[in-house]
Amino acid sequence: MSSSSKLILELSGKKRAVLEALLREQGIGEAKDERIPRRTESGPAELSFAQQRLWFLHQLEPESPLYNIHVAVDLSGPLNVAVLQRSLGEIFRRHEALRTTFAVIDGRPVQVINETSVFKLPVSDLREINEVSAWAEEEARRRFDLTKGPLLRANLLRLG
């Protein structure tokens, strides 16, 4: 917190209200809405800067797993697989970014937000395999198809 912010917080209620009114008159200190507004129209939308970068790199090297983010979470104890599947499916349903794919329309890349689909959680029994890390590395290198999606994958591995 800046020293001026601390000083403002230390002002009495009346003095702070007067200061804020004076600042508003000067056009200073107006509250800015930091949220990204929700899209009201449907159909393709422009790519964000990060999406443009991702799309461009995918055009250069379509087989590259450069942007893959591989995360392993160790779960121990009893697991209700159906509840985990439904939970991940609900996250997928609620977040358009997870259902977004890319298309080229009139020579320009755009994002296409796909309708809610079923999120699949494959379950693999790897209790008999000693090379789980090799399996995980291979999965991490598997590329995503930005035009088809989904751009999120999850696997449940039974290890014990």
Image (cartoon, rainbow, N blue to C red):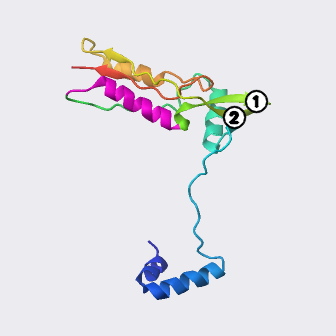
Examine the rendering and report whether any part of residue 70 can be seen.
Answer: no
Q: Which residues are magenta?
A: 78-95
Secondary structure character of the magenta stretch overall: helix
Residues tagged 2 and 1 counted as in contact (Cβ below 8 A): yes
Residue bearing mark 2 = 44
Where does the C terminus fall, quadrant-wise?
top left
Q: Residues within 10 Å of mark 1 (few under 14, many from 20)?
A: few
Q: Residue 145: x and y, percent?
A: 58, 23
Instruction: Locate residue 12 relative to residue 44 in the image: left or right.
Output: left
- Whether residue 120 is visible, yes or no, is yes
Examine the rendered structure and indicate whether residue 159 appears above or below residue 31: above
Q: Is residue 93 left or right of residue 109?
A: left
Label 2 residue SS: loop
At horizontal 62% and vertical 38% (from top left) the residue drawn is 51
Q: Which mark is residue 134?
A: none
Residue 81 lies, in percent from the top left, at 30, 24
Q: Can you identify the residue that label 1 sits on?
A: 105
